[in-house]
Amino acid sequence: MKLAPRELDAVQLLLDTAAAGRVDLARHVGRAGPVELEIGCGKGEFLVAAAARWPGTLFVGVEIARKYFLKTAARIHRAGLENARVLWMDSALLLDRWIAPVSLRAVHVYFPDPWPKRRHHKRRVVSPRFAAAVARTLRPGGSLYLLTDDAPVFAAACEVLGQAGGLAPQTFDAGAPSRPRTGYEEKWRREGRTIFAARWLRRGHGV
């Protein structure tokens, strides 16, 4: 489904990267309430399902691949959701430069590219810089969720996040029926693959 320009404008999130200062995404789109960000939203299965289930929360997906950005935009449009947006951008740049501090309730990272070759490890989503950006943009009590079917990626991510200031590991029931799943997760679970899941809580006052 190809969206007309006005239809795409209604569901995509645009940032003025020439402007100074960081952006509160809820205010940017004219909404009140919590904001959750999905890194690498792919075709938008989780984003759309979560937005439909929790209409009081703004769900923003960021996707660097143009074709998946457009697929997610079309999915949001078909669902008629007013609390979902998708952004075509490098997620590292978004978190590092444009998201206002303590403005996110959650960050979701589901089945990121494992970049298995050692020389490509620097391209993995979870890095010390990413961890610092997440700790800065999550509000106290906010959560970072990670799911992957790749054991080395999971181990490396846990090591990085374990060394990050302000983040504490928490229990996470990835099999809870209330949690929407991505297309990859549904596929991998049907195939019987092991899914590695973890959650980190942003420490802060009262947490």
Image (tube, helix red, strand yellow):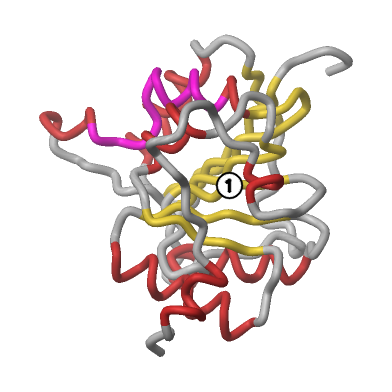
* Farthest front residue in view: 19
Foreground pick, 144 / 25: 25
**Disc count in the image?**
1
What residue would you read off at disc 1?
37
The amino acid on which the numbered mark 1 sits, given as a three-letter code, is Leu
**Main secondary structure found in the magenta portion:** helix
Q: Residues within 10 Å of mark 1 (few under 14, many from 20)?
A: many
Foreground pick, 5 / 92: 5
Measured as percent of width and height from the top left, residue 119 is found at: 11, 30
**Vertical position of residue 124 compared to residue 12: above or below:** above
- Viewed as shown, does residue 57 lie left or right of 145? right
Which region shows up in magenta? 123-134
The quadrant where residue 49 appears: bottom right
Q: Magenta segment: does it hold 124?
A: yes
Measured as percent of width and height from the top left, residue 170 is found at: 70, 29
Rendered residue at 40%/42% (across/down): 91
Q: Magenta segment: does it hold 184?
A: no
